[in-house]
Image (tube, grey):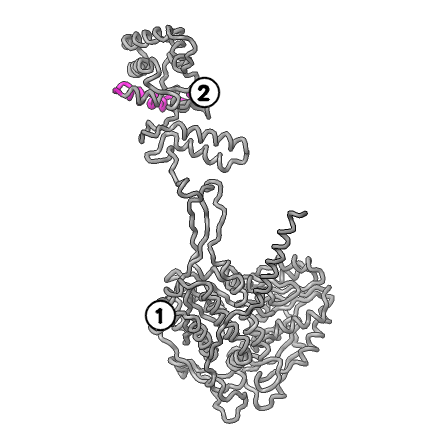
Amino acid sequence: MAFWWPLVVLGVAFAVCRFLFMLIPHNVPSIEVDASDVLEDRSQTKENSYIYIPRKGKMAQADKVQCYEPATMKYLGFCEALTPEEVKEHVAQARDAQKIWASSSFRQRRQFLRILLKYIIEHQELICEISSRDTGKTMVDASLGEIMTTCEKITWLLSEGEKWLKPEYRSSGRSMLHKRAKVEFHPLGVIGAIVSWNYPFHNVFNPMLAAVFSGNAAVIKVSEHASWSGCFYFRIIQAALAAVGAPDNLVHIITGYAETGQALVSSVDKIIFVGSPGVGKMIMQKASETLIPVTLELGGKDAFIVCEDVDLATVVQVAMRGALQSSGQNCAGAERFYVHKDIFTAFVAQIVKLMKSISVGPPLAGRYDMGAICMQEHSEKLQNLVNDAQDKGAEIVFRGSFDHLGGDIVDQFFPPTVIVKVDHTMKLMQEEAFGPIIPIMKFSSDEEAIKLANDSKYGLGCAVFSGNQKRAIAIASQLHCGVAAINDFASTYMCQSLPFGGVKHSGFGRFAGVEGLRACCLVKSVVVDRWWPFIKTVIPKPIQYPVAENAFVFQESLVEALYGLNVWDRLRSLINVVKIISEQNPKSSNRNQRQMINTTAACSLVLPSLKNLVPLRPKSSCQKRACRREATNLLLECLNSKVETAGKRLKLDMGRKAGGLYVNPKKFRAAGKPCMKEMLSFLGCLSLNKNNDDKCVRQKDMLLACVDAQKNKPKGHKSTINYHLQRLSREKFW
């Protein structure tokens, strides 16, 4: 017990010190961002203000992006529509800055994040107001979708970002036990992003934060429908970068139309796109010209499944938020509601009851629950979806009105709508609506709900509600989508440690989380010697060039030794590998280094005199011919004044191994082995003369004389060659 007390005391002391350290605030400087121009004429009334009417077709100005408030049509100003040449210049400037920033420390990058976080917290109202004016959303919607998500991402990067960008060590496998394997994450260069208009602050900051923290530069094209706010948010980024001494031009915000985006795609090292499937396909096609990686988030048609065992009052509130957040203009918004038949009527009744209390209007002109639709043409699309559903039998059970707004109403408001009796033949249940419409469909079983939810070309997210959590998880696990929330909606995005993205027409690739952060990196695999310089890489001798004749046998044994399923087979193969390596002659670099004579080669001499010496038999005539060729070559080598070399190679170890006979040069030294020269000369003569020993009398006499001389040597001589020579002498095989 006494042994553990010091450890306990140290642990408590460490915890206390860490807690006290957390209480010490970081020294984070404040930044000043000029907002005087954007705060002029903040009231959303038509008095004394210019009302902008968007021009279409040939009337549109190609060199300017006109900006206006969707909720009032009040003119905000314009941004330059950059040409392709100007875009490439921005990218070139960012690339030069990135070369400097790539060597920045994580401490400097974290300080950049802290400065941003401090400014965001202190200026929430300003940031939300700018977003509200440019997109029509309410201040509450802006706080939820712009502020909270961005702050969550920053805090996650502060706490875990460095950990996930440091080299990660991996297992090296059986064949590379002497190596260390790791993955390194290096900056790609310039990350390009083309982002949507629905959350202008977060959509700018989301790719920028990941790119800059991972050592990249960022060039972000904001939507032409949210350029005014995007340009102001850029000032915040510039001020924070300057405060940490980052190079100028590390981050760029560009504005323009389609050609601006095309020029960006062809200039950067990676592109992140948030938008529609149609534009996403064009970006993929453009990116294929330079083969840069692409991350596409293309929206969704998320299913919202409600089982019969839920707390209905709670689920209805979540459903309303999922459908009406930012006027339904959410990539991961709830767009298809599937409710169990047992609670269908009650669910619809409670939804309608809450809908009647929803107020719609200009978000800064009063307290409203829902704001405007960002684009006038989108309001028209929503109405067409509703009309198509009605034509096919759907029933509208609730539709909001704007009577309270009087004559101040503009075309970019859409009434919150509840529709029942819908089915999958209607466009409303197949196409992304991106608006405040709640289509509700009943189901009878979990299997039917799963089938309905998967019947979509989109696959971004889903939400499943049940009083039995295991049941909800089981349903969600069978839905073909990228993110899933159990008894909640969109909580996956608030967990910034998780990747975000979809499948099918919802795109591919991930941003957010570890996967999104590392997607901004060049992922490099590195292998180094584990015990350098004591153990270095050496190519095994059997497979060194020129490869030995037993190289494939060596490889077979090595493969089985490393990957065999049976332990004993692996052990036997390992012994074989060691034996083959040990039999190599380190002083030779040709075929004489090591040699294995297999069964067919051993019996290829095809001489009656070798029946006792080599009892193994060839299995076919083809094997006989191959054996004869091999033996002839070896014996010719012996006769050509290379007797000692051939002797080292041809020494026969009679132990059978894997169907063959092994040459073991380490067990034989030609100078010390008697009668080898004479025996090889005799066998070679027989081979050359087709076994006619009458032409080999001289060689035979020399061999017999040598054998007789060996008989007089002291007993106990265990030489293998002596043993065989004695057999040759006794049996008189010729």
Residue 463 is left or right of residue 632, and the answer is right
From the viewer's perspective, is 442 left or right of 45? right
Between residue 303 and residue 573, name the one nearer to us: 573
Amino acid at circle 1: Gln
Tell me where residue 390 sits by quadrant: bottom right
Q: Which residue is mark 2?
A: 655
Q: Position of residue 502 (x, y in %)?
A: 53, 62
Q: Locate the C terminus and report the quarter of the image it occupies.
A: top left
Quadrant in the rendering for residue 12: bottom right
In whole angstroms, how far apart are the C-alphas of marks 2 and 1? 74 Å
Percent of width and height locating residue 31:
47, 77
**Residue 501 visible in the current orientation:** no
Residue type at the position of mark 2 = Gly
Residue 23 seen from this side:
yes
Q: Is residue 626 magenta?
A: yes
Q: Which residues are magenta?
A: 617-641
Asked if residue 444 lies left or right of residue 97, the reply is right
379 sits left or right of 696 in the view: right
Q: Are marks 2 and 1 in contact (CB under 8 Å)?
A: no
Nearest the viewer among 209 and 733 is 209
* Residue depicted at 44% across the width and 63% down the height: 105
Q: Is residue 603 above or below residue 711?
A: below
- Work out which residue is located at the far left of the displayed protein and give it: 640
Q: Residues within 10 Å of mark 1 (few under 14, many from 20)?
A: some
Foreground residue among 526 and 296:
526
What kind of secondary structure does the magenta stretch mostly adopt?
helix
The residue wearing badge 1 is 93
Q: Residue at x 46, y 54 (%)?
A: 167
Q: Secondary structure at mark 2?
A: strand
Which residue is at 25% across, 20% downward?
A: 641
Residue 81, given in percent of the width and then of the height, sits at 39, 78
